[in-house]
Image (cartoon, helix red, strand yellow):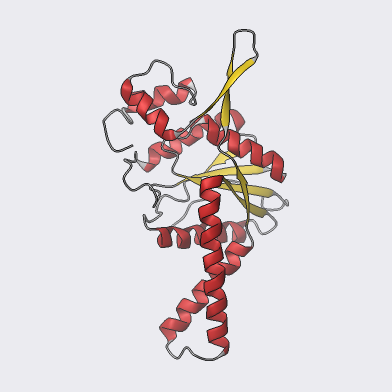
Amino acid sequence: MKMNIGINLGKHEEKRIGLQFGSYNPPHEAHVQTAKDLKEAGGLDTVLMLPIPQSPYKKQIGQVPFNDKVEMCQIIAEPYNDWLKVSDACANFPTTFTGQLQYCKRTIEKLFNEHADAKFSIVAGEDFSQKYKEAVAGMAYLSMVMETCKSMSIFDFAMIQNFADRVIRANDVFQNVDVLSAPRATLPIVGKDGQIIDRVEVSSKAIRQAIRSGAEEIIGIPDRLRDYIMQRGLYSTPHPS
């Protein structure tokens, strides 16, 4: 499968780049706020939004076409395009957790190869980062087992040896990427005097529900993104939320 990172990150400059994988169904301003908070906390130069077609944890939730996710991410990232970029590299992500973990490894590995001087970090909210850390910890343990078995010459079959080598290589990739996580972002509600009067949590689920209910005001998405969603008829038909 061909992967297109599609972003010029500066091959000859040392950069710190955040990778923000997500369903983005739809993307919203809290995604941007999380990216901004972690960019500042981690000293990142760039954050790369990487929409995926389907989260393995949200298979019951209806998804819009992948190309619409990319376009929506580009709309919401546009005001911040000096540091927030969008890539379609995950267009062919499988729907299973193990398949996505492997493809995630290949995406990161491709970035390593193309930008050897850059340092990469996973940028995520607490829920995703916890799942990612657990998966990487499991990969590290499995890699240790594979290394031990190989050193003891337990593997006699080429197919099993190949599997062991793939696990070890995957672990090497994941161990070279740190994880920056943040609590769920909240957005300020600003009064007429310009003062913050409240803060609200924003979620893709709440936005989908607001769109289906015909709400006149939808907190968390800019007007241009709302117009795109309405023109395309996205999220207008009922499906599991």
In the displayed structure, would residue 138 be above or below residue 52? below
Side (left or right) of 154 relative to 42: left
Side (left or right) of 175 relative to 5: right
Residue 193: x and y, percent?
A: 64, 8
Toward which corner of the image does residue 36 lie, by quadrant? top right
Quadrant, the C terminus: top left
Residue at (36%, 24%) from the top-left corner?
Answer: 211
Q: Farthest residue toward the top?
A: 192
Residue at (70%, 39%) from the top-left corner?
Answer: 40
In the displayed structure, would residue 217 be above or below residue 151? above
Toward which corner of the image does residue 80 lie, by quadrant? top right
Residue at (31%, 27%) from the top-left corner?
Answer: 233
Residues 113 and 31: in front is 31
Q: Farthest residue toward the left?
A: 238
**Is residue 68 visible to us here?**
yes
**Is residue 1 visible to us here?**
no
Residue 173: x and y, percent?
A: 59, 64
Residue 147: x and y, percent?
A: 57, 81
Residues 112 and 237: in front is 237
Toward which corner of the image does residue 117 lie, by quadrant? bottom right
Q: Farthest residue toward the front?
A: 198
In the displayed structure, would residue 141 be above or below residue 16? below
Residues 1 and 227: in front is 227
Quadrant, the N terminus: bottom left
Residue 149: x and y, percent?
A: 53, 85
Q: State the count of labels.
A: 0
Residue at (45%, 39%) from the top-left corner?
Answer: 24
